[in-house]
Each structure stands twice: as structure tokens, then as C-alpha cells.
Image (cartoon, grey):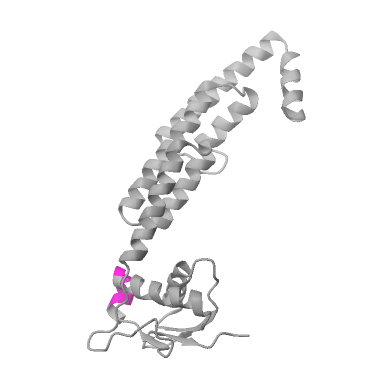
């Protein structure tokens, strides 16, 4: 038990009965408000006005309060359900964020561990399914051939940011992870360039892609010799 918690408990023991009754009433009110927050989906937001903060506040006053503990468990389950929905739609980054919220609410549990395993499998499967594609009517570039350094990006696929484009960029990113080549991204807008860079970075696990983004009507990725 921390010193601050011990001091809090000692101070509570010294309160008169009327104050203890008021404290109990305040705790019950916080629990009621927190339950309403869960129903309204105010799980961790807005700041300082949500179910998570209220349940935690109750536990600071009553460490063994079962209703507050069950409330945090309910929040975690709600976030896991949201994470599962994201994963079902292929939104794996969003699913991971919701999983992190579930762990924050109720710690690491068997349910969060099981979902973490399923999420990792989904991420691996997505990477396996990703296949690099080139522009129609152009020869398919051999991304593993280090003599090939220019990769044209299909404008339609890039505008849709579809799985074909994600797959092509993932393959380039995996090459860069091993080769450490410098990346020049030519994109039609700054936002498009940043999105291309993020796809390369997502695929190059453990390595920060080094490169630059330039504007061009003809989107492409050019790989140059690694920087010293």
C-alpha cells in the first residue's frame, strides 16, 4: 500500500459518521454517473467526464469496490468489441488502438491476450496477401532485383488507396528494410506523398525509412543508394 493511500484510509477512519455517510453517497453517485457514461459510450472521453475516470476515482476511495471493478471490465469488453469490428473490416491499426484502450481500462487479461494473438495473425495474413502490381500495359517490375530502382504507381489504385496499391508499396517497403536504400517519393499532393511514405514505413518493421517527397503529376517511387 502506498503512503498516499494509507494516509487517505487513515483520514477516512477519522471522519465522523455523517461525513462517512456523505462519502458513501458520493461514491454511489459517481458509480451511477459512470454507469450512465458506459451506456452513452463515454468510455474514456471526453477528458475528466467519462466512465473510466469515474470508476478509477471510486477505486481511489474504495480499493475493493466491486461495482467499479466490474465497470472497468465492462469498458474493456466494449473496447474489445469495437476492436473486433475494426479487425473484421480490415482496419487493423484502429483495432490495435482499441485493444490498447481495453488494456488501459482493465489490464492484460485472457481476453486481451487472445485478441492480441488474433490481431497479429490478421496482420501477418494481410502482409502475405499483399501482392505488388504495376501499371497496366507495363512490364511487372521485379522489386527484389536491386537493378530495378523506379516503380511507377497506378494513378487509379493510388487515388482509391486500394489493396493493390497497399500491396505494391508494402513490397517496396520490405525491400527497403533490407537494402536501406534512400527513397524518393513523387506524388500528386503532399497528403498523397505522406500516405505513400506511411505505407512504406508500415512494411519496413524495425527500420525507419529515409527519403524525401516531391510533387509530380506522375506518381512513382525511386530508390537510390543508401546514405552514409
Position of residue 22 relative to residue 63, above or below, is: above
Say whether residue 41 is visible: no
Question: Residue drawn at (35%, 70%), measured in percent from left and top?
Answer: 166
Question: Residue drawn at (30%, 65%), measured in percent from left and top?
Answer: 129
Position of residue 64 relative to residue 97, above or below, is: above
The one nearer the camera, 58 or 92, is 92
- 162 in the magenta segment: yes
Residue 84 falls left or right of residue 76? left
The one nearer the camera, 144 or 137, is 144
Q: Quadrant of the N terminus?
A: top right
| Quarter residue 186 falls in | bottom left
Q: Quadrant of the C terminus?
A: bottom right
Q: Position of residue 150 (x, y in %)?
A: 40, 88
Question: Residue drawn at (62%, 22%), measured in percent from left and top?
Answer: 62
Q: Position of residue 200 (x, y in %)?
A: 45, 73
Q: Which residues are magenta?
A: 157-163
Q: Position of residue 154 (x, y in %)?
A: 30, 81
Residue 105 falls left or right of residue 89? right
Amino acid at each position: 500500500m502506498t503512503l498516499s493511500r494509507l494516509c487517505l484510509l487513515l483520514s477516512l477512519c477519522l471522519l465522523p459518521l455523517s461525513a462517512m455517510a456523505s462519502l458513501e453517497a458520493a461514491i454511489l453517485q459517481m458509480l451511477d454517473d459512470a454507469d450512465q457514461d458506459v451506456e452513452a459510450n463515454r468510455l474514456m472521453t471526453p477528458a475528466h467526464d467519462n466512465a473510466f475516470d469515474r470508476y478509477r476515482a471510486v477505486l481511489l476511495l474504495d480499493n475493493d469496490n466491486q461495482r467499479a471493478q466490474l465497470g472497468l471490465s465492462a469498458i474493456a469488453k466494449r473496447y474489445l468489441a469495437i476492436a473486433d469490428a475494426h479487425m473484421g473490416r480490415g482496419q487493423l491499426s484502429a483495432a490495435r488502438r482499441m485493444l490498447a484502450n481495453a488494456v488501459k481500462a482493465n489490464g492484460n487479461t485472457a481476453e486481451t491476450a487472445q485478441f492480441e494473438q488474433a490481431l497479429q495473425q490478421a496482420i501477418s495474413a494481410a502482409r502475405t496477401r499483399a501482392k505488388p502490381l504495376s501499371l497496366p500495359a507495363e512490364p511487372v517490375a521485379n522489386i527484389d532485383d536491386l537493378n530495378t530502382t523506379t516503380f511507377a504507381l497506378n494513378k487509379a489504385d493510388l487515388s482509391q488507396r486500394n489493396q493493390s496499391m497497399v500491396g505494391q508499396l508494402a513490397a517496396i517497403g520490405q525491400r527497403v528494410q533490407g537494402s536501406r536504400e534512400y527513397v524518393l517519393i513523387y506524388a500528386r499532393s503532399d497528403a498523397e506523398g505522406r500516405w505513400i511514405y506511411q505505407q512504406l514505413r508500415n512494411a519496413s518493421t524495425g527500420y525507419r525509412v529515409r527519403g524525401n517527397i516531391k510533387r509530380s503529376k506522375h506518381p512513382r517511387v525511386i530508390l537510390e543508394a543508401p546514405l552514409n
